[in-house]
Amino acid sequence: MVGDEAHLAQLLTGQDRTTVLGAVRTAIGGGLTEEDIRLISNRKEQLRRFERLLTDHDYFRKEESLATTRGVEAVWQAFFETNQWIFGYGLNLIACESIDDGKLERITTGANIFSGAGKRIDAIMRSKGLISSMLFCEIKTHDTELLAKTPYRAGVYQASKELGGGVAQVQKTVSKAQQLISHEFLTRIHDDDGTPTGIELSTTRPRQVVVIGSLREFTHNGAVNPEKINSFELYRTSIQDVEIITFDERPTARA
């Protein structure tokens, strides 16, 4: 199969765009458009960029220096804002998108999207479906520590301050949002000026996600520390209603 792909690529090298597009359409049954190709190409490029942000320290610092808002978290926030489709590749196989084709980062209490009239969350999304459910996400950084540096007891590592704080943060945000809209099973979304958007969301137990850190933290000289990974897995599987995902568990790490 690999040989066939290489032979096809060689045959199409130097051909004009129309010829290449026609060949691909024939190969997959004729349903591919130029816009499809552009989207696929851009997404592959963004996946490569994600991997580089994750692994190339110098490249990341350069991106940080160019960011409008300074800070490591700002780089990741900007990436996810631009590439919201990436959340459709994971999160327990439930595709998600921004609430109303707007930004992921929103104010959820105070002047907020529920009353139109606070508490800020890095990403609030809705599932794609006939009836949408809500997902709240806190986005930290790829180099945020997952566990405390020193063991609490021999072989026992506790969650880092940032990990524990991120979990508490998303829990509090969801709690406050639910208090605001708890009188309804469905809630309507409004623009900033109060105009109804026509979007209705289920308010029953919104999903909660924290994207933080990297599993590389648990390796040394290429080998995994079993006590550390065990402590981390025990912690995150014990947290009710909050899904903890590391940056290298995002789809780019497996692409």
Image (spheres, grey):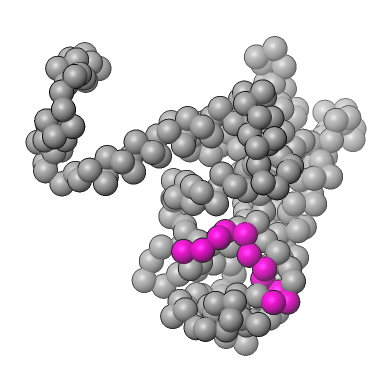
- Indicate left or right for 137 with 187 as reference: right
Q: Is residue 24 visible?
A: no
Taking 79 as reference, is 8 left or right? Answer: left
Q: Locate residue 209 relative to residue 94 in the image: left or right.
A: right
Q: Quadrant of residue 5?
A: top left
Q: Quadrant of the N terminus?
A: top left
Give coordinates of residue 36: x percent, y percent: 27, 45
Q: Is residue 103 magenta?
A: yes
What count of labels does the image hold? 0
> In the image, what residue occupies the spot 31% across and 41% down?
38
Q: Is residue 94 above or below residue 226?
A: below
Residue at the spot 20% in from the left edge and 18% down from the top edge:
13
Magenta residues?
101-111
Q: Which residue: 13% across, 34% down? A: 18
Residue 194 percent coordinates (x, y):
57, 84
Residue at figure coordinates x 51%, y 63% from the top left: 102
Query: At which x and y percent is residue 52?
Result: 56, 27
Work out whether 177 lies above or below 96.
below
Asked whether residue 78 is drawn in magenta, I would say: no
Residue at the far bottom in the pictured view:
183
Depth order, front residue of 146/196: 196
Picture layout, residue 142 above or below residue 222: below
In the rendered image, residue 211, in percent from the top left (x then y), is placed at: 64, 46
Q: Depth check: 240 or 20 in front?
A: 20
Residue 19 seen in render = yes
Figure quadrant of residue 248:
top right
